[in-house]
Amino acid sequence: MTTDLRIAFLPLTDAAVLAVAREKGFAEEEGLHLDLVRTTSWATLRDRLVFGQVQAAHMLAPLAVAVTLGLSQQAAPLAAPYKLNVNGNMLVMASAFAQALDPDIAARLDDPLGTAHDFAAAIGLWKRKPVIGVVHRFSSHSVMLRYWLASAGVDPDRDVILRVLPPSLTVEAIGAGEIDGFIAGEPWGSAAVDAGLAEAVAIGERIWRRGVEKILAFRTPWLEENPDSVDRLLRALVRAAAWCDDPQHHEALAHLLSRPQYVDQPADVILRALSGGIVPRVDMAPLSMPDFMLFSREATPFPWRSQALWIYSQLVRWKMVEHSADNTAKAASVFRPDIFRRALADSDVAMPGASMKVEGAVGSPLAVGSKRGELTLGPDRFFDGRVFDPERIEDFLASF
């Protein structure tokens, strides 16, 4: 008997694992039929999940935390037992603005701290308070942008204007002069560069080497009432993610995602994020960034509770939520490593023995304790050298 699951997604490269699970038969082998519901905005996707129009959603990790904390329209407890990817976004700015930054773009992207200070100086030279597009107030990109700007003394609530717009409208908006730049998941930054409208200014992977991005979100009551369906879906996604991370499949994956029902952008533009060959300006050769977007390796799908708490710390930092023991517990509860472990218990998938870790502490590949097999975690440094200990949130917040 086949189980039907409706899953909402946005047209982004990081929806790849869902598309592959459906198109390459991984879901079917688990007795699932996936109805992938293409959605334009994160607000609409959130509502479809919260009001039960879909059973699961490809979602911004901070949005899942915010909905659970009651910060985003209708409050609802959400659960994320699976991370769909890490990294995958970049900040692009209008070419005229970028002229005030280091002309050596490779050096610019490799030195986020120096570039943040250059950006701060460029704000004063620009014709207006810079308008930067973000895809949602509670997006990974918005949280990362705030963290990056603040490192150079820029107040993201005072010195720039953050304007919310759907990812698929970002290129049109910068072309019309409505915004001066934007930060979004691929392929939209590459599309703006390809159109000659913008240059890459900062790469998410260089701000936080293994920054949490999209998660698979469920309403918590539905997740708890349907354990078999959840487990089968997670098993299918783990296999699909391994397929996505295999370089031999990147070209085929780019063509799959280029279809109108998925991302509907040229395959060669989509391929850049998958292969890590990022074109930062229209007249430049690609720069090699092999960790630009990860789907499977280094336990990418594993939902570390410490990453949910890092997101929470940033919501507290920017006064979006009051810090309390209750709110801390709610935020931590969104990421569900227990469900991930249950679903993969009979598989040969290596997974961490712990559910939390000190974020930003790994500088080079590190072998860690695993329930089975060998597991190596990649570097997860923050660009400013800070580390986040989830047991010491107050000390982390005081450091700012």
Image (cartoon, rainbow, N blue to C red):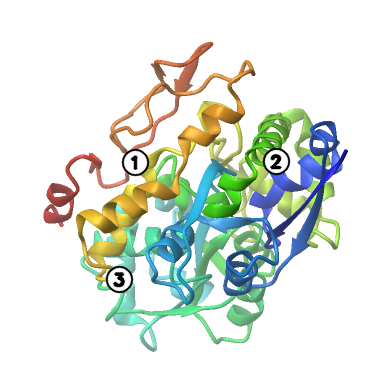
Residue 190, above or below 234: below
Amino acid carrying mark 3 in the image: Met
Determine whether, in the image, residue 251 is placed left or right of residue 136.
right
Residue at point 32%, 44% (across, down):
382
The residue positioned 77% from the left and 29% from the top of the image is: 248
Query: Spatial distance from mark 3 to mark 2, Cα to Cα?
Result: 34 Å
Residue 88 rendering spot, x and y as whole percentages: 56, 50
Q: Do the residues labelled 1 and 3 touch (CB within 8 Å)?
A: no
Q: Mark 1 points at which residue?
A: 306
Q: What residue type is labelled 2?
A: Ser
Residue 119 falls left or right of residue 235: left
List the residue tagged with mark 2. 229
Label 1 – label 2 distance at C-alpha? 26 Å
Q: In which quarter of the image is residue 230?
A: top right
Residue corresponding to mark 3: 320
Q: What element does badge 1 sit on?
A: helix
Upstream in the sequence, badge 3 or badge 2?
2
- Looking at marks 1 and 2 on the same chain, the residue that comes earlier in the sequence is marked by 2
Residue most extreme to the front: 225
Quadrant of the rendered image containing residue 211:
top left
Which residue is most to the top?
A: 373
Q: Within 10 Å of the Cα at label 2, are there few (<14), some (14-19), or many (20+) other Cα atoms?
A: some
